[in-house]
Amino acid sequence: MAEAILGDHDRYSCSICLELLRDPVTIPCGHSYCMSCITECWNTNDQKGTYRCPQCRHTYNSKPPLNRSTILAEIMEQLRSTELQVSESSLAGPGDVACDFCAGEMIKAVKSCLECRASYCEVHLQPHYNVPALKKHKLVKAAVIPVCPKHDKVLEVYCRNDQKCVCMHCLLDDHKGHDTVPSAIERKEKEKKLTDSQTKVKQTLQTKEKELQKMKMDIGSHSDSAKKAVDNSKKVFSELVKLIEKKTIEVIEEIKAQEKADLDQGTKLQKKLEEEIAKLKKRDEVLEDLIQTDDNIQFLQNYESVSSSSGSAKLQSFSFQPYCSFDDVGKLICELTKRLETTCTQEISKTLNKVSDVSAKRPSFDIAVGDRVRVKPSVVTPTHKWGSVTHSSVGVVKKIQGDLLTVDFPEQRNWTGLVSEMQHETSTGSDLSTKNGPVSIKVGDRVRVKPSITTPKHNWGRNVNNKSVGVVKDIKDDDSVVVDFPGHANWKGILAEMELVTNDEEIEPSNLDSNIKVGDKVRVKPSVATPTHKWGAVTHKSIGVVKKVQGDSLTVDFPEQKNWTGIVSEMEIVASAASGLESVIKIGDQVRVKPSVVTPTHKWGAVTHKSIGVVQKIHSSLESLIVDFPEHKKWTGLISEMELVTGADLDDIKVGDSVRVKSSIITPKHNWGGHVTHKSVGIVKDIKSENVIVDFPSHKGWKGILSEMELVNNADADVSGSS
């Protein structure tokens, strides 16, 4: 109704002031005016004695009476009230785009024109629907139209080199010769990727919802099992003497306690899964909003921030795994009815112990599947060894069996440890301040990249790895940090990826920094591109004697330069012959790159951490060596970056085993032959020294070498065979 009244706005306007009638009066010809407007009009009339209607020009010889219209006055009041309400609802609020053509109050715009670079309300938008020249303009949902800050032109093109939107003038200026495409084309490509990401998010969401449903069923079934055990216990023990009734109560209480503990654990997992599903749904909504955006420029500008986490990464799966099966308890209770009264006490104790023993296996500190844990600082060496894990490593509990648990660390998957040797990792993102990152990290502190970080957000850079220790040079407002590492000055990272290095920590155990003392033979580490105090006449091959150690600094006498000053963290002890470190590697040995080496000094080539090769030559400096790998002949590396591969490290391949060619082998030494591929699985028929004879389905009597083969378990063999 408001729209109908406002549509008749002109009908109720005074033809003199062009505003809604105020104190309306009607003259004899039937036209209505504001009392003040018609009075002033007639008082200023040049032709005295005559009065004329401003609209129909009807003339009166005497001043006609001005009759106030009561009904019209009421309509005017209603119209003003309605107009006020409609105008208030149309005002632009916080976050709204205002019409560029409305005078006075800011009216909310409904559309923006990319050609006019202006936004319009419903009223001022009408010419774009009616005027032929304006109909061709591109209208989008009301928004602030981004323009080039340099040329003040509309952004129309996307530069793939610089990953940003630019205007047409930029193509002739800063972006000349760059790979550029229209924004619509780039949006189409990125929208396809975003749609794929959304599909993966939806698939993950469906998987998690199924997990949640299964978990609810498992929890319900477990609860029913517990209730059934309680009911059976009541029925059996009700037929026994008072002594047995007393024991019945004890068993029931133990079962209920165990049920509560299991249900608490299940509820905790269920809550985690529900939170994960909620995050995925929120992520799906964000992706959907971006995909539905009409403005290509807005879409592209928001694409990177929205698409950085697609939700497609492999997520932790949860399942309800109770620590006790009440079916076993029920069987034990039924057996009690067949025993003599004199043995009842003994049997009841056995039943109680059955429940208590399983409960006792519950992880200490209530560690459950899905928790974040680390090895306790008090544990020098875990019972099941470190592997690639350290005290700083933080992983997620994947499985718990009695006193053992399986943890996925970023450095090592499926790591096995003891529950008693682990502790909860309580630090979270809330420990970070909004501006200066971790409260304890400040300019001047010694830091390193956390061991749990596989690849930093801004990449490793030159000679930087998890063991590199540098000094914080600057901390930005966006939580980024600038660090000076010995091998890379002004390295950029983010605070959340860094950790403090205290003076009493062992910085690089493999290099024995903390043991450097006066009299030791040392050299600059291969990972140091340029020492903090510069090279002088010293090189990586120079070996000198430590003359003085003072804090982090040391003085070394090199043959090339006396009293050379360096820092301890940049040096390594040269003690190959004395300590038996690198000197144990000799020509003919099987070696591989150490797991701690992120990138070898002389690069990977076709070699990987899993590659095993034979030493062909060792240079007289005992620093570098030549290795023949199956993937890469005459590969050059540093002895300090290599480790021996003993028989225990190799797969124990024997006649009758199922094997296949390693995925790291591009072409076997004796070639592929027949239809043998990486997926082919065959049976070992004969082994002679390093050579092996394999019967593949497609090639009998195939010849290869042991170091190029890997064992295939039965499950893998079945899959490969079926394929």
Image (tube, rainbow, N blue to C red):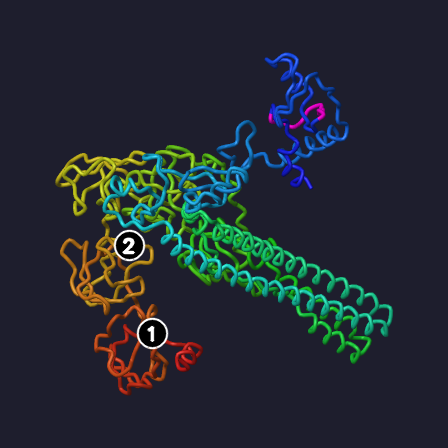
Amino acid found under the numbered disc labelled 2: Thr
Q: Secondary structure at mark 1?
A: strand
Q: In this rendered view, identify the residue nearer to me: 369 or 314.
A: 314
Dot label at residue 447: none
Q: Nearer the viewer, residue 132 or 325?
A: 132
Quadrant of the snapshot with the C terminus: bottom left
Is-magenta flag for residue 20? yes
Query: Which residues make up the magenta segment?
Result: 18-28
- Magenta span contains residue 719: no
Where is mark 1, residue-wise?
Answer: 710
Q: Position of residue 248 (x, y in %)?
A: 80, 67
Q: Is residue 320 above or below residue 690?
A: above
Query: Badge 2 is on which residue?
Result: 599
Q: Is residue 647 left or right of residue 200?
A: left
The answer to whether residue 641 is left or right of residue 73 is left
696 w.r.t. 625: above or below = below
User: Which part of the image, by quadrant, shows the N terminus?
Assistant: top right
